[in-house]
Image (spheres, grey):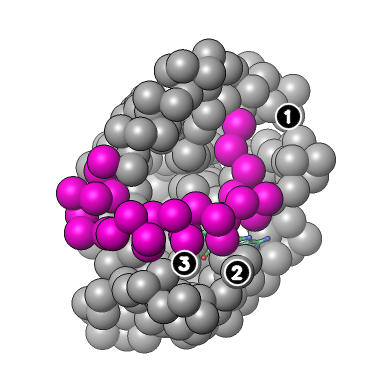
């Protein structure tokens, strides 16, 4: 796995983009920047095993290098599920396709280059949206989630993981400090942490747990719960009636 040292470079792009340089180091970046990244995938697998039906289609929207679908397809082999990953970064889709070939999963998982806010979705039993809704323009989020609700079959499940903010400023500050401690513990320097934070400003726009839950409810999901939280990261499950 190539190590992420993008923000050691003073010439790194001022605005964060999912370009080929990021795709190259992205697996390392995720593991060292998203607390409990693999634990959340594990919990997603547990939830899906409970809620999807044999033959269901499972979408991973903003699939990046395909890590989640590769893990799900490894674990959920008995119910003939169709796995589809969509991402609008060609470099991410190329890497995901290569990884699927390496693990002989090219017949089980399809990776598609496309904009998840525009692409037509076929009926599905589950949609996964891990750390991606935060990159969709806030004003476009409700209509996007409404489209996901429409694509899901009755009883279908939507899983969302996000960086979150807190409404209480003191708690919010503390959670961000704990997150920066986590990044230091993963070997990132103060300069790397500061540059990456500046690069994500106005690009990654987090909502609170309450705002995300309300958004999901307004998009048609009457049952919404959080199933995981690590300070300023949370995961939600919503079921279509
Ligand atoms: C933080 S990464 C997601 C990580 C991935 N879900 C995982 O858990 O391994 C966000 C991804 O969303 C993709 N993305 C952002 N906006 C998108 C859009 N409108 N359509 C498709 N993909 C998008 C980016 O290219 C990037 O690969």
At horizontal 58% and vertical 38% (from top left) the residue drawn is 206
**Which residues lie in the magenta part?**
181-207
| Mark 3–mark 2 distance (CA, rounded to whole Å) | 21 Å
Q: Is residue 19 above or below residue 218?
A: below
* Helix, strand or loop status at disc 2: loop
In the figure, is residue 221 to the left or right of 109? Answer: right
Using the image, tell me which numbered label, if any, was put on residue 67.
Answer: none
- Observer-nearest residue: 96 or 3? 3
Of callouts 1 and 2, which one flags the residue occurring earlier in the amino acid sequence? Answer: 2
Using the image, tell me which numbered label, if any, was put on residue 64.
Answer: 3
* Helix, strand or loop status at disc 3: loop
Q: Does 205 appear in magenta?
A: yes
Residue 9 in percent (x, y) is at 41, 78
Q: Residues within 10 Å of mark 3 (few under 14, many from 20)?
A: many
* Front position among marks 1 and 3: 3
Of callouts 3 and 2, which one flags the residue occurring earlier in the amino acid sequence? Answer: 2
In the figure, is residue 212 to the left or right of 231? Answer: right
At horizontal 30% and vertical 33% (from top left) the residue drawn is 178
Using the image, tell me which numbered label, if any, was put on residue 219.
Answer: 1
| Mark 1–mark 2 distance (CA, rounded to whole Å) | 34 Å
At horizontal 49% and vertical 48% (from top left) the residue drawn is 131
Q: Does 184 appear in magenta?
A: yes
Q: Is residue 239 above or below residue 108?
A: above
Residue 50 in percent (x, y) is at 33, 33
Quadrant of the frame with the N terminus = bottom left
Q: Is mark 3 within 8 Å of ligand 1?
A: yes
* Helix, strand or loop status at disc 1: loop
Of callouts 1 and 3, which one flags the residue occurring earlier in the amino acid sequence? Answer: 3
Residue 25 in percent (x, y) is at 35, 75
Residue 129 in view (yes/no): yes
Residue 27 in view (yes/no): no
């Amino acid at each position: 796995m190539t190590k992420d040292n993008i923000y050691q470079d003073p010439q790194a792009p001022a605005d964060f983009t999912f370009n080929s340089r990021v795709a190259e180091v992205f697996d390392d970046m995720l593991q060292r920047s998203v607390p409990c990244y693999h634990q959340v995938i594990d919990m997603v697998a547990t939830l899906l095993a409970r809620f999807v039906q044999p033959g269901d289609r499972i979408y991973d929207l903003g699939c990046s290098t395909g890590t989640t679908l590769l893990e799900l397809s490894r674990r959920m082999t008995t119910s003939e599920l169709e796995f589809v990953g969509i991402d609008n970064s060609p470099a991410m889709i190329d890497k995901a396709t290569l990884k699927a070939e390496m693990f002989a999963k090219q017949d089980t998982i399809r990776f598609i280059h496309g904009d998840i806010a525009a692409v037509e979705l076929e009926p599905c039993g589950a949609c996964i949206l891990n750390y991606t809704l935060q990159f969709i323009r806030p004003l476009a989020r409700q209509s996007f989630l409404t489209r996901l609700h429409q694509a899901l079959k009755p009883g279908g499940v939507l899983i969302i993981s996000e960086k979150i903010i807190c409404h209480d400023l003191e708690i919010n500050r503390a959670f961000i400090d704990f997150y920066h401690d986590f990044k230091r513990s993963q070997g990132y320097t103060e300069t790397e942490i500061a540059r990456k934070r500046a690069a994500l400003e106005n690009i990654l726009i987090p909502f609170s747990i309450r705002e995300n839950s309300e958004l999901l409810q307004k998009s048609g999901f009457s049952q919404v719960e959080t199933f995981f939280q690590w300070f300023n990261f949370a995961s939600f499950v919503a079921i279509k009636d």
